[in-house]
Structures are given as C-alpha cells and as structure tokens.
Image (spheres, rainbow, N blue to C red):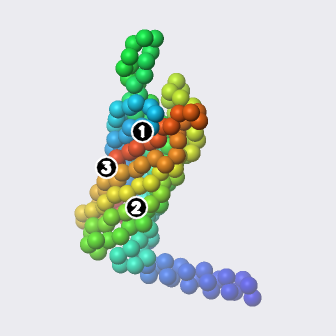
Amino acid sequence: MKKIIFLVAALAGSFAMQAQGIDFGIKAGANFSKFSGDLDSDGITNFHAGAVVEVNLMPTFSVQAEGLFSSQGGKAKYDDGGVVGVAKDINLDYISVPVMAKFYLLPDRLSVMAGPQFSFLVSDAEEAFDTKSFDMAAAAGVELKIFAGLFAQARYTVGLSNVSDVSEVDVKNNVFQLSVGYFF
C-alpha cells in the first residue's frame, strides 16, 4: 500500500513539474573580484562556467540553481622585506552553488534575482594565506532572456564568511559577474 501511495505521489509530482516547467542550460562569463576586510587588495579578472537549472513555479516567479566553477580572488598589497606596496594575484578556485529566487519584471524576458551562494574551495594560492574550504555569500542580479534560449546576466556577490583560516584576519570575497548562457 505504501508503495502505491508513493508511486501515485511521484507521478503527480512529475506531472506538476512538467506543467510548471524545468529549464536546463549552461553559462559562462567573467569574474571581476577583490577582497574586502583586513587585506588591502585591488581587483583581478577571472572566469566562471557551469550548469544552470530553472524551475518555473509561477509565471512571475522561479527558482534557479547553478553549479559553477568560479575563479575568484584579488591582487593583494603587502610589505615584502621593506618594499611597500608589492602586489600579488591571489586566486581562489571554487565550486559555487548559487540558489536564486527569480522575480520576472517582464514575463519570460527580464528578471531580478537574489539568494545565497555556497562555495567549496578546490584550489588556492599556496603562499597567500590559509584559506577555509567553505565560503558563504549573498548574491543579487538581473537576467535578460534575449531570444531562443540565449540569456545574459549581471550579478554581484558579497562574501558573508571569512575566507581566511586565521581568526585575527577578516578577508571576504566580493565578485561582480557578467555571464552569457543558453537554456536548452
């Protein structure tokens, strides 16, 4: 009996998903990132790329989740043996999972989005500083669906957690992203 109820619920859920619509896609673009906090840094340019899934819940609201490889960081300024202002690129590579609530201002065309981003460190600059393996951020942006599945996005991500493993140092990621993508 439990198996039949589960089967009916699963079928009903799949029909509801079909009615609401699920769109899969890919995206890639540029990251303009820097550190904020105790580390004096300038911005660097990197990239991000990955997969996108959008679940349309209502005509004006959907949820979009992404799985991205995102290279972030900054150009840190520090003193090196009496030489002040030496700058060095610090690259931190993450697998980032933003989960965005999307509100359509123009149905199926223009939307604003906001939500959390969970990032897992996969590679860091060895000489920079001890980095934490997890980064939490808040993200907000806009998306324009151009035509036939093609879209463009602009998003700003503000780090909420300290990326440094040294408790006396407060360093957070800040990233502005420009992306293009395609929904299949």
Q: Amino acid at mark 2?
A: Ala
Local crowd size for mark 3, using a 10 Å CA cut-off: few (<14), some (14–19), many (≥20): some
Between discs 3 and 2, the one toward the N terminus: 2
Residue hosting label 3: 178
Q: Nearer the viewer, mark 1 or mark 3?
A: 1
Front-most of residues 39 and 26 = 39
Residue corresponding to mark 2: 114
Q: Is residue 131 visible?
A: no
Residue 181: horizontal and vertical position, in percent? Answer: 33, 56
Residue projecting furthest to the right: 1
Horizontal arrangement in the rendering, residue 108 relative to residue 129 (left or right): left
* C-alpha gap between disc 1 and disc 3: 20 Å
Location of the N terminus (image quadrant): bottom right
Q: Which residue is mark 1?
A: 36
Q: Residue at x 31, y 66 (%)?
A: 111
Q: CA distance from mark 3 to mark 2?
A: 15 Å
Foreground: 132 or 144? 132
| Residue at 37%, 40% in the rendered image | 33
* First in residue order: circle 2 vs circle 1: 1
Q: Would you say the residues marked 3 and 2 are in contact, meaning their CB atoms lie under 8 Å apart?
A: no
Give x and y (percent) for residue 157: 40, 50
